[in-house]
Amino acid sequence: MKLDSFGDWRRTHYSVDVKPEMDGLEVTLFGWVQEIRDLGGIRFIILQDREGTIQITIPRKKVANEVLSKSDILQKRYSIGVKGTVKKTEVTPRGVEVIPKEIKIFGTAAPQLPIDITGKTPASLETRLDARALDLCQDKNIAVFKIQHAAVEAIRDFLFEKGFVEVHTPRIIASATEGGAALFPVDYFGRKAFLAQSPQLYKEQLVMSLEKVFEVGPFFRAEESHTRFHTSEFVSIDIEQAFADAEDVMQLLERLMQHVCKVVNEKCGKELALLKHKIEVPTVPFKRLTYDEVLKELERESVNVPWGEDIPTPALRTLGKIHPHFYFITDWPTHSKAFYIKPRDDKPEICEGFDLMWRWLELVSGGTRIADKELLIKRLKEKGLNPEAFKFHLQAFDFGMPPHAGWAIGLERLTMMLTGKRNIREVTLYPRDKFRVTP
RNA sequence: GCCCUGGUAGUAUAGUCCGGUCUAGUAUAAGCGGCUGUCGCCCGCUAGACCCGGGUUCAAAUCCCGGCCAGGGCGCCA
């Protein structure tokens, strides 16, 4: 089919901005055919764009021949432009429709689409992810990513306002800097390099110069993890702050979470309604539970976790039932946390690391960092890591490392919380896991 | 990596336990035709499927074995 040229047509309104008060006005709309209801003498085209839908009404005997013949060949998902007149009416839910004067077809679509975009016939997550570009056109999915966008915008605004500088650290790193978690190897001009699993070491170094930094970016973990809250590529929102400790960044974090919930509620009422999800704006301060208190609470529920162990997922689920909102877990055993988390001065077996939980899900992890080079080397060794492999990081500690603290939010997990989605793949545009690298 | 459950038209499902009128049902999507106020439009017609490989049996969508894949759970995971 010969497609129409875009030419000098420019959008005057999004679908949702066409209002009954505009009766008689000419508008130019762009979007996609979502549905066609042809009653014979009259035809209804539902035009969808990013913001919503509007009905294009074509009374067979009252429109120009060119409009009629154009509308004859329209199919679902065709990308079109419509120039037409707004008509106030009682017979559509929105109270308006547009009578076209001219229709342009910019892009066609296959007659048999892999998923039903109106949502009448549901598709499995696998089918949807296989046709993700189309799946993302569904209004509910657009809503998910608008909410995610609103959250990121709110986080950036909040951190800018608090004087944080947005930075960009390397994604390609030379060595397995943090031990533990598996890294993806990269062939770097014949040398072995890795995809970064965290900006941790770089953001710590940056507090020496920029003092308060944050970064929003993707990180990579080659874990076997096959759960509904792990992917191998995820977006982390990291901060690091000089002259601060865990309590300072926890206070920053709880206010940030409150702010995000408030902003998303205000800006995304329509999207939340579409997803049938409600966000409760939390009050600060959030509940703070020590690791020991958590163990005691679990014991009362007949869940036994030996002291020193990380808390396994089933135990966290139990805990989430007792605390169905935000809460911190603090005072973790030092050896259960990363080498750079500062042990308490008075009680070195306990550290100044914390997790921010939402129900059973770990949303954020953070803590006071070690600023003392000798102590850091000691902790590296205790973790079975070779200080020699960290020499480029350790040298920073010869250049005046201030006391500092920070945290990292898992953006997709935050989005799960904000949208009520139960699988992290739903809130990731193009999820990557052990079994999926396409599309 | 382990456990449980599953894999049937484009999509979503029924059928599988207890093998045989299953010539595989239904909904929706698609194609064709009809319809002037639909909004999950409606009506008629058409076409469309048993994950792959092996085995048992007179006979396999159905039972057995292996593989691949998916969902959930576990483990792993600063």
Image (cartoon, coloured by chain):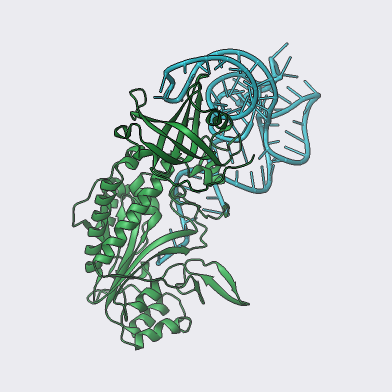
Estimate the x, y position of residue A151 in percent, counting from the top left. 33, 54
The residue positioned 37% from the left and 52% from the top of the image is A148
Work out which quarter of the rendered image holds the N terminus of chain A and state it. Answer: top right
The chain coloured green is A
Depth check: A53 or A145 in front? A53
Depth check: A433 or B15 in front? A433
Depth check: B51 or A411 in front? A411
Q: Is residue A132 above or below residue A111?
A: below
Depth check: A193 or A20 in front? A20
The residue positioned 40% from the left and 49% from the top of the image is A145
Q: In the picture provided, is B28 more to the left or to the right than A266?
A: right
Write down the quadrant of residue B25 in the picture: top right
Estimate the x, y position of residue A98 in percent, counting from the top left. 41, 32
Q: In the picture provided, is A280 more to the left or to the right than A146?
A: left
The residue positioned 33% from the left and 48% from the top of the image is A418
The chain coloured cyan is B
